[in-house]
Image (cartoon, coloured by chain):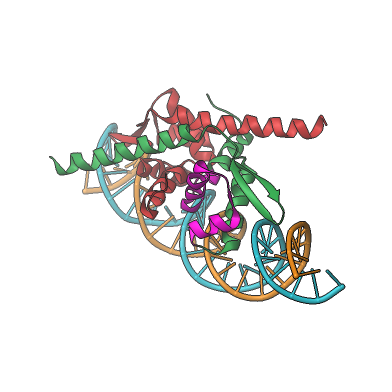
Chain colours: A green, B red, C orange, D cyan
Amino acid sequence: MIKTKAQYDARAEIAKALSHPTRLLLLDALAERDLCVGELTEIVGADQSTVSKHLAVLKDAGFVEVEKRGTMSFYSIRCQCLDQFFGCIESVLRQKVRAQQDLVEL
Amino acid sequence: MIKTKAQYDARAEIAKALSHPTRLLLLDALAERDLCVGELTEIVGADQSTVSKHLAVLKDAGFVEVEKRGTMSFYSIRCQCLDQFFGCIESVLRQKVRAQQDLVEL
DNA sequence: CTTCTTTATGGTCATATAGCCATAAATGCG
DNA sequence: CGCATTTATGGCTATATGACCATAAAGAAG
């Protein structure tokens, strides 16, 4: 079903938030437990400002939410749909591997 | 579960292919039936070369495949997982709408 | 063979993205 | 209050992306 330009823009905006390796790592880390920016920065291994900006992207898209406790910000997963998303990605990856194998096993 | 950098890179690469409104439109159009580049260009309303490049991105990611018939190229959906992906996106969008409503109905 | 049609690719330019550094803002603590 | 800690934001730069135009490549048709 064809949608309007605005609908595709909104959907692409959401998808774009999931199109960076660091942000996928952040989501995986947060899937285990809520974490603050300092802990996430440690996990990612980039500059703290870089991690903060990635978290802002995830928050704006609606994938995570933030709760301030004192001077720290704890992030947590806000959507229950990430399994669906990753399921699709994994499926495509498996299919690509199979295609590669077919090229070898001619 | 935390993965390796290469694994996140590969997954982000797949997700990136879905992060542009024109490519989402192309997938929706192809979900109805297989189409050639000319037809897709008509639907999208951009330059033919632009559409061709978007199709190449979707093909490289593994979402579509191409079959040449004469001088024309027919594209078709290659994965069965797009419903999962769009399900997640729609879910996030609905949640954002709800959050907006909450701000109004205080 | 020449010409037309269809698609893919290279060039160029404007904009977007992501990285780091420096620093502001907010809070807790002595 | 003054200082330390934690996070967010502005500035800057390098790279990536996407748009169009022009054109190459491949096949169909005369």
Q: What x and y, as percent, mark residue B67?
A: 29, 34
Q: Residue at x 37, y 38 (%)?
A: A90
User: Is residue A34 on the magenta stretch?
Assistant: yes
Q: From the viewer's perspective, is residue A35 above or below residue C29?
A: above
Q: What x and y, as percent, mark residue A92?
A: 36, 37
Farthest residue to the left: give it: A106
Q: Quadrant of the C terminus of chain A?
A: top left
Which residue is more in the foreground, A61 or B39? A61
Q: What x and y, as percent, mark residue A34?
A: 57, 45
**Prevailing secondary structure class for the magenta stretch in the rendered image:** helix
Q: Magenta residues, as a range?
A: A16-45
Which residue is more in the foreground, A56 or A77? A77
Q: What x and y, as percent, mark residue D9?
A: 71, 60
| Residue B19 seen from this side | no
State which quadrant residue A77 falls in: top right
Please indicate whether residue A23 sits to the left or right of residue B104 in the image.
left
User: Is residue A41 on the magenta stretch?
Assistant: yes
Q: Residue at x 73, y 34 (%)?
A: B100
Please indicate whether residue B33 sits to the left or right of residue A34 in the image.
left
